[in-house]
Amino acid sequence: MLADLKPTHVFRPVSDIAACMSTSEEPSPGSPSITPSGVRLGKFQIFEQIGQGAMGEVYRGYHPEQGMEVAVKVISGEQAGEQRYHRAFGHEVRSVAGLDHPGIVRLFDYGVIGESDEALAPRAFRPGSPYLVMEYARAGTLAGLMSGAQPWAVIELVAYAVLDALAHSHARGVVHRDIKPQNVLLDRGEAGWPGVLLTDFGLAYALQPQEGANQHKKVAGTPQYMAPEQLLGRWREYGPATDLYALGCVIFEMICGEVPFGGENVMKIARAHLDHPVPALRPRSEVPEGVEGWLARLLAKDPRQRWASAALAARELRRAVGRAPSGVSVRQWQTLLQANAASTEDRLTTEMRGPGSGQMSPFHALTPLLNFEPERPVGDVAQRFTPLPASWERPRRASSLRVAGAGLGLFGLRRFAMVGRDEERELLWSTLREVLTTREPAAVMLTGAPGVGKDHLADWLVERAQEVGSVQALHVRYRADGDASDGVIDALMHHLGLNGLGRSEVMGRLEAIVRAGGGDDPYLWQAMTELLMPTQPGEEGGVRMSGQAQRQRALADFLMRLAMAGPLIIRLQDVHRGVEALGWVSLLLHQLQEPVPIFVIMSARDDAMALSETHARALGELREGGAFTEEPVDALSPADTQSFVEELLFLEPGLAREVAERCAGNPLVATTLVARWIERGLLQPTLDGFRLEREVFASELRDDELLWLAPALALVDVYGEDQLFALQLAAVLGARFELKNWKRACELAEIAWSMDVVEHLLVRRHLVEVGGDRLAFAQNLLKEALLTHLRGSGGWQKAHALCAQVLEPAVERGEEGALERSAAMLKEGGEPEKAVRRYMEASELRRVRGEQHVNAYLLDQAWQAMERMPAEGNETIARLRVELAVARAWAYNSLYYIALALEWAERAEVLALELGDAALVAQARAMAGACSVVGGQPEKGERLLRQALAHFREHGSEDFPRAYMTCTTALARSLARRSEWAEVSILLAEGAAQAAAAGDTVMVANARYESLILSYRRGDMPSLTEVDELIAICELSDQSMGLSEAFNLRAEVLRSQGNLEGARAALERSLHYCSRVNVQNGMVAMMNLGLMLFMEKNIDEARSYFERAAVSFRRQRRPQLLLYAVLGCLVNALNERDKGRVQQLAEEALRLIRDTRFYGDGDARLLVESAIALAEDAGEEWGRRARLKELREAMPNLLTAP
């Protein structure tokens, strides 16, 4: 978007937008021999009009001090004053300003004509007209070369040059959408580049009157070169293939002298594109035989049938031709351009003439194609992706052209150069290349201080790999704490083009992706639909997601299928704000069922990662699993810092050195300093570069808070004091916020809200658009500085109270995430009790969805709000405090954080006793008792459980069925250890009755499973009928983990009947269902497969199952299950006579028996007996190593166990 910058503003986009009469200033020698128009824009003198388009006019301009010609494009007509055209124009300018390629026209400056210019300017220069100052091409356009036949060498040169430029733009998310001969300019080259320049990137498309209307109405372009998806308005299909189709039309025209699909009017042209086959080539000069087939692929009606990238199209052109480019000499090319310039009544200056030897090279981004071998065979994936080159390097382009007094309007829009970092780049490139070669996933985390360039480095890798056509990329941005789910959801919705689709359409597209990646399980696309578009409470039809593990498993499996269609880079930005993403990253690295080329590159602030125990635990799991590298990104060296500053802006040498010294190797500090000076109007142009007018302002920026707050202070300078509070309201609304909510918050605060302010922030990239009408802070440091200032200025509570009001309609509508956001506002806005209730309501929704980590986080926030209320004197608050403590205990128990669950249950018991509420006391004791039993305190646990159970039996438990069933189940398990089966049966029946009365199928399934599993442990093997009934109940409630456990039990029944084949099939089904949730939870079935193989005397084959289970159970800290796996590994080690492993495993087994008070079963006895037998056979030495004496002493406990 483009700000409506008035002449009175301190900041002016082209240094000084002041038009003035210039009759006394003559053009410098070498400038065009024409009459000056009498108008200047900043440092540029404007001459006659040289072009006309539907949306604007182009003028020849001149920079007198440097003797340089430029082109100035002014958006004219009535639409010039309309904001929607300003926004669209600004959006496209931001995109193109970020490109830096010798085949893409350079932008020098841009802005908006001020009101004072009206009397002095030509008709086009009306107030409010946006304009661009850009590179001037003096040899005409490609259209001039179409009049006569060109040799294949020239056609090939143009094709490769345009493909190279498109590869660069597509990798940065910019699709041209209007490739045609008139938009391919010709000029002198640079460093061997032929001077083929793309211009007008998508401007005609973006400036259609439908901008802002429904996306499906957008149809734009030049009909003769428009792809079918453009003609049909299928905007979801727009992409690189759209530009490749247009290029195919252009190359066809160069060869044949006419476009492939013509007609008398637009309708006939469109019908030809949509229905007619590609005409046979009738070349005006000889072309290689394979070119026709290559063009046919470019001109396929379905974009999925075209080459997937410009790099791939270039590679396949070379394959089709069968050799390297023919080559055009510099002299031949210059002669051709001279003739084309003459035909357009232009002329080339002496700068165009030079040595005539050497060849023009059409490769820059695609330089690695020079080493491509055409005869190399390709597979299916290679039809869509190119092999990653051995080196990431490409020819270094000369420094950006320095234009004195210009460029301030583009400062925040340009992509800053990648300076230095060669070692880091080599590490990333080589790791990615290994992933693509071996098809084994890997991850790298870039850590460092804010602003050192972590994101810039990660973005470089993604863009360079996409530029050469080797990968697809998914960019996940985490902009707020606790954003783990929303970040990846937004990324997938955007990447897959799902925004705006209905649920059934989304599911259909997801199914197609899964099937394309070799999957055929409907559960996966159904689960992903639920993940991306959750069913709301009361709705039916969605897959039940029973926990965070299940969500992460579904996501990991889907990403695997996505990568099966082509190598995938997953870019996780600011992962310290989405630490739960490390869970599914761990699944990708360590638990995928098939090898796939997935490379995860993460960036995170090292200070944030070091402070959090959650981060430390997640990182520990990644390190333990391998395939993970941490790469610190330090400050730039002094030399690299100086180079970076020199690339930022044309500054005076002394000022550039001062910036380099002050930023201490931090690129973000350097850019923020310069941006601050630009915003405050402190930079003045000189021929030696911009200089700082008043040093006093520079000293203000030595304070870090003021430095990061600079954009807000500049806003105050331009739009008034109240706009600082307006921007602080945006920060309170969150890292991502809706435009309408910001506007409403300002209205409630009685602040004048203006779209000009939004555009001011967007054009300087302080804010970015993130889809729909949502905005986000581009740098979280700005958001943090705004909130810090807000807290210190006394407006904290008022701002949060206003934003809480803004969110009330969203809460009432039940919008996703509105409850928790509202609760956060209420907590800080002076309404803690209401905040607690909102948090608890939000947490219950998350619990029902199975998002237990988010549930626990929300309850933690609720407790923080609770602590802001008085501890005594209010019974309502006291009751709420107990209910919250109980809820926290349940949440931690669901996450298997037993110690924390017990701590909160005991706290809840104390609070409930103080309150005198027996029902709440019973709830707290039920959870405390269950945790005590699991935590190794059975006596204490049974006492608490019996106390709670007595209350429920006397007073009923209609309001607490879950607590009642927890009592019966936990107590039954504990009593089973002592073989008190009579009471166990009573308790299980009681629990089943409670579950049935509650009408909860999940509770019913759990009760039935507990009954069957304890019967099995008692020695009463369940029947297949009973197990199959349990399976049916689990299927009804869509419990993946329940189904896994039920099939595991079914395998035990079948094994006891001697049906080993059926048992193995049941175990495989158990693993299948478990893999939907988390492969780690399937290790019980994995270990049972090992036991089955062991019983079949397949000790060697059983080894891998026992070892995998042992690794998993150690990681999960499940000692009782770990003992089985360790015993299995011990038997295998004795069988292989592995001394080191035998001693280590024997010691571990004995420690586990002792620490867990293991009571054993037939499988454990069998393994111990086998170990003893093998040790005795091996001799006395092996008996000592295997700790035979201690194992014999442990045997009585195992042998007497049921």
Image: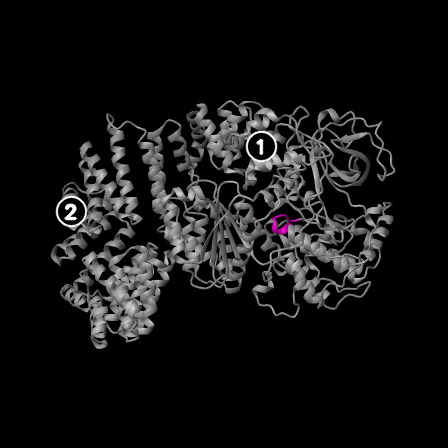
- Seen from the viewer's position, the closer of residues 1118 and 434 is 434
Marks 2/1 in contact by CB < 8 Å: the verdict is no
Where 948 falls versus 626 (above or below)? above
Which residues are drawn in magenta? Answer: 169-175
Image check: 334 left or right of 967? Answer: right
Residue 288 seen anywhere in this rendered image of the structure? yes
Residue assigned mark 2? 940
- The quarter of the picture where residue 68 lies is top right
Where residue 1138 appears, as percent x and y from the top left, is 30, 71
Label 2 secondary element = helix
Q: Does 86 sit above or below residue 1167?
A: above
One can see residue 543 in this view: no
Would you place residue 626 above or below residue 908 in this image? Answer: below
Classify mark 1: helix, strand or loop: helix
User: Residue 948: x, y in percent?
Assistant: 17, 43
The residue shown at (20%, 67%) is: 1187
Image quarter of residue 433: bottom right
Q: Is residue 1105 left or right of residue 402?
A: left
Which residue corresponds to the image point at 33% horizontal and 59% vertical from the top-left?
Answer: 1112
Q: Nearer the viewer, mark 2 or mark 1?
A: 2
Residue closer to the observer: 755 or 25: 25
> Mark 1 sits on what residue?
758
Based on the picture, tell me whether residue 170 belongs to the magenta stretch: yes
Earlier residue among tags 2 and 1:
1
Categorize mark 1 by other alpha carbons within 10 Å: few (<14), some (14-19), many (20+): some
Image coordinates of residue 717 in percent, x first then y, are 59, 24
Which residue is drawn at the image coordinates 27% and 33% (left, top)?
880
Marks 2/1: CA–CA distance: 62 Å
According to the image, what is the colour scheme of the structure? Answer: one colour
The quadrant of the image that shows the N terminus is: top right
* Residue type at tag 2: Lys
